[in-house]
Image (tube, rainbow, N blue to C red):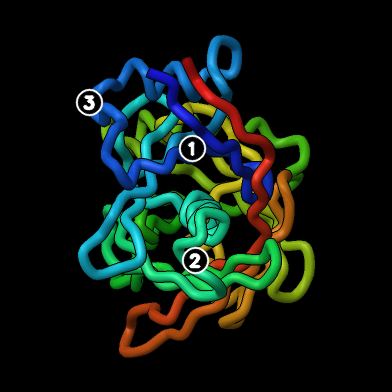
Amino acid sequence: MAIPFYKYQGTGNDFVLIDNRDLHFNKNNTDLVKLLCDRKFGIGADGLILLEPDAEAHFKMVYYNADGRESSMCGNGGRCIVHFARFLGIVEDEATFTAIDGWHEATIEGDIVSLKMTNVEGLTEKEDSIFLDTGSPHHVTQVEGLKDYNVFSEGRSIRNDVYGEAGANVNFVEPLAKNTFSVRTYERGVEDETLSCGTGVTAVAIAMHAWGKAGEAVTIETPGGTLEVSFEKQNGHYENIWLKGPAKQVFKGSWE
């Protein structure tokens, strides 16, 4: 059976998008998901996303890492699927959807998608890092000379040695200006550096605020482009968190 697909990217974080409203895609076929994401033998992507029906929201998002396994929330993927839903005629300039971490809202203006993230209840602060969950688990640490930093080697070490088999995404951050930071991320499931990570830049923005180095509106420069994060801190936790940036359809095709 031919599988129609659409390739999307959000600040260089790329995904295979499939309209699965008729539930035709075999979600138990881990090998197929891995193959579709393979950059040598497949379409090539950091992850695969299914758009499915939902009883209360406009749609449901099901996300798989490039390793073929269903994973936690993906912020850039969430922005891309909102753009995709508009392309399909499901939504116009506003959207609601459910994902593995719960309910999300979004707005769309041209190719700019603003996605409301789930609240962040707690942070684990260590001597030189902060761990928090922004829909996916993230380790945030500050470094100097980020442009030349060995993100792959250091990220893989922290992901495995500190967080074990379950792992965590690892973000390295360097200040650029007031409320502006440069970030590079090693992503679990991809097991490599990606050009951008939506839940990662969200984690970095909140971590920088927790360290007293940023306000409640932050600009993040990733290798794949610029993202904006805003939030409010209320009673010790972070809420009204919004991730804003571009999302674009790159091409479409059919997998035989």
Residue sitting at x 35%, y 57%: 135
Which one is in front, 59 or 170? Answer: 59
Q: Position of residue 220 (x, y in %)?
A: 67, 62
Q: Between marks 1 and 3, how big is the CA–CA gap?
A: 23 Å
Q: Which residue is mark 3?
A: 28
Q: Residues within 10 Å of mark 3 (few under 14, many from 20)?
A: few
Q: Amino acid at mark 1?
A: Glu
Q: Amino acid at mark 3?
A: Asn
Question: Label 2: which residue?
Answer: 207
Q: Would you place residue 172 above or below residue 202 in this image?
A: above
Mark whose residue sits in front, 2 or 1:
1
Q: Is residue 163 left or right of residue 108?
A: left
Q: Residue at x 26, y 30 (%)?
A: 27
- Dot 2 or dot 3: first in sequence order is 3
- Residue situated furthest top in the rendering: 41
- Residue 192 visible to the viewer: yes
Q: Is residue 73 above or below residue 186?
A: below
Tell me the mark number nearer the camera, choosing from 2 and 3: 3
Q: Given this view, does label 1 or label 3 mark the residue nearer the observer?
A: 3
Residue ID for mark 1: 187
Q: Nearer the viewer, residue 247 or 171?
A: 247
Residue type at mark 2? Ala
Q: Residues within 10 Å of mark 2 (few under 14, many from 20)?
A: many
Which of the image's four quarters has the N terminus? top left
Comparing 83 with 10, the one in front is 83
Element under disc 3 = loop
Dot placed on the residue nearer the N-terminal end, 2 or 1: 1
Q: Is residue 133 visible?
A: no
Residue found at x 27% / y 21%: 29
